[in-house]
């Protein structure tokens, strides 16, 4: 009898790819999900797979499901969602299952990361709002003297609760509203205040396995406000060898100091010429939204194969693609975009006839969509493929909302 690999939640793009990847590895997929968290294509695809309802923010509920199913029938328990990594790392540790490295428990804490690699980050201060004395924050800002700062939640991803400011008074104005957007299980009062380092936003993609760090390449990430709206991969040649090699050196140092023993990473840097600063250490999973799909298209392979590679590294610690394969991308004319609405509205109907690129819908009809720029949750869907196909398809999208008919945009 085949063993199972349990996957806790999945993004709107991942369910079908993940299920096929697990079957290719010789296992059966089971998804643990709270259906209320799911939207768009993920909800449709989960209906076609074996899924078990579970409160996926509660470690004890996940453990109850695993034990009821039979731990001996499970080869691994994993997730590709940033918000569930620490939860699954804890569950794995207590259940004795592979899937997310225990080292992620420290790495999810931005303040901890900043403490172990201080020489590679912008000047930073970790705080707990309403616990850390206000004078400590004021003193940090006064001593820094920077023209601009960024405040980021300590445990979240997707830019929820992130904001910039120039003075302590402006920080106090903005933080209460920002905290309201963060779920309680992600410790909303825990924040990082950091000097703003201007430059291009680039993520380094790769994985650690069997005492070795392997790099896949670099992705340029374009943002509108707090929403990522376009990805360009490969980008390592565009950013230059000096900057790319500096980023790789920082990643290797972080992995060594954090004792990160296995798993994918997509680590974000600000790059200005040859100067680089690490700003977000996303460890334990590959890049989200359509980054994996974009990488697959750049190497002219199926996205299923990339997901197979990621899951095998996470659960079996056995890469299924030789890293030398990633030395030479086949295509550089591909891109991935995340589109949205210029203003917040309730989406009632969506239409995209015969797309030439790969399209995935992230939301349900009836959802109130935040205006583009608020966070990555402003994205309605993704398009990935040849650049000309992607932008042709973007122009064809029609959306009926409670405020009228709109086209899709990646900037306002």
Image (cartoon, helix red, strand yellow):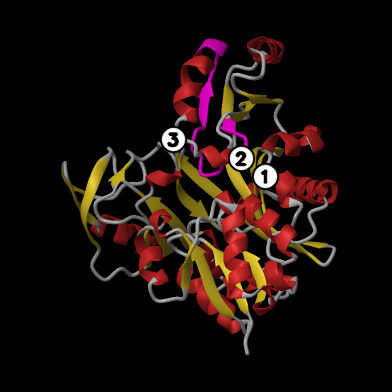
Q: Main secondary structure of the magenta part?
A: loop
Q: Earlier in the sequence, mark 2 or mark 1?
A: 1
Give me the residue at 65% from left, 79% from top. 73
Disc 3 element? loop
Question: Height in image: 94 above or below 1?
Answer: above
Asked whether the viewer can see residue 386, the reply is no
Disc 1 element? loop
> Which residue does the numbered mark 1 point to in the structure image?
108
The image shows residue 131 at horizontal and vertical percentages of 64, 20
| Direction from residue 366 to residue 134 in the image, left or right | right
Q: Earlier in the sequence, mark 1 or mark 3?
A: 1
Q: In this rendering, which labeled residue sits more in front, label 2 or label 3?
A: 2
Magenta span includes 157: yes
Asked whether the viewer can see residue 402, the reply is yes
Question: Height in image: 323 above or below 366?
Answer: below
> Which residue does the numbered mark 2 point to in the structure image?
155
User: Is the residue marked by circle 2 packed among few (<14), some (14-19), or many (20+) residues within 10 Å?
Assistant: many
Disc 2 element? loop
Q: In this view of the protein, which residue sits in the foreground, 57 or 151? A: 57
| Direction from residue 394 to residue 308 in the image, left or right | right
**Which range is magenta?**
152-169
Cβ–Cβ below 8 Å for labels 2 and 1?
yes
Magenta span includes 119: no
What is the spatial separation of the Cα atoms under label 2 and label 1, in whole angstroms? 6 Å
Q: In this view of the protein, which residue sits in the foreground, 308 or 278? A: 308
């Amino acid at each position: 009898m085949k063993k199972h690999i349990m996957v806790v939640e999945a993004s709107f793009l991942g369910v079908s790819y993940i299920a096929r990847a697990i079957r290719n590895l010789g296992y059966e997929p089971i998804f643990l999900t709270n259906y209320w968290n799911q939207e768009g294509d993920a909800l449709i695809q989960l209906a076609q797979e074996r899924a078990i309802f579970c409160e996926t923010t509660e470690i004890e509920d996940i453990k109850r499901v695993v034990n009821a199913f039979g731990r001996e029938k499970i080869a691994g328990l994993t997730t590709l969602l940033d918000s569930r990594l620490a939860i699954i790392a804890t569950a794995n540790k207590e259940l004795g299952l592979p899937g997310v490295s225990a080292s992620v428990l420290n790495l999810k804490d931005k303040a901890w990361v900043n403490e172990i690699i201080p020489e590679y980050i912008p000047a930073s201060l970790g705080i707990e709002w309403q616990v850390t004395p206000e004078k400590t924050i004021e003193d940090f800002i006064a001593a820094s003297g920077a023209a601009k700062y960024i405040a980021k939640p300590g445990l979240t991803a997707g830019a929820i609760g992130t904001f910039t400011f120039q003075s302590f008074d402006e920080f106090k104005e903005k933080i209460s509203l920002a905290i309201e957007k963060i779920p309680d299980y992600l410790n909303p009062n825990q924040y990082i205040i950091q000097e703003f380092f201007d430059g291009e936003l680039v993520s380094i993609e790769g994985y650690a396995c069997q005492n070795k760090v392997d790099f896949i390449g670099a992705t340029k990430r374009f943002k509108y406000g707090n929403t990522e709206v376009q990805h360009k991969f490969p980008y390592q040649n565009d950013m230059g060898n000096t900057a790319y090699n500096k980023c790789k050196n920082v990643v290797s140092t972080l992995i060594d100091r954090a004792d990160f023993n296995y798993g994918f990473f997509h680590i974000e840097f600000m790059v200005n010429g040859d100067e680089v600063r690490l700003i977000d250490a996303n460890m334990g999973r590959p890049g989200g939204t359509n980054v994996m799909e974009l990488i697959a298209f750049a190497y002219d392979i199926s996205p299923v194969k990339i997901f197979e590679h990621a899951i095998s590294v996470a659960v079996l610690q056995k890469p299924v693609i030789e890293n030398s394969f990633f030395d030479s991308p086949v295509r550089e004319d591909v891109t991935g975009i995340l589109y949205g609405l210029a203003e917040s509205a309730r989406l009632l109907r969506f239409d995209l006839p015969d797309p030439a690129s790969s399209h995935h819908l992230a939301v349900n009809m009836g959802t109130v969509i935040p205006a583009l720029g608020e966070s990555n949750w402003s994205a309605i869907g993704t398009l990935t493929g040849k650049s000309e196909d992607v932008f042709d398809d973007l122009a064809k999208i029609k959306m009926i909302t409670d405020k009228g008919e709109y086209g899709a945009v990646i900037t306002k």
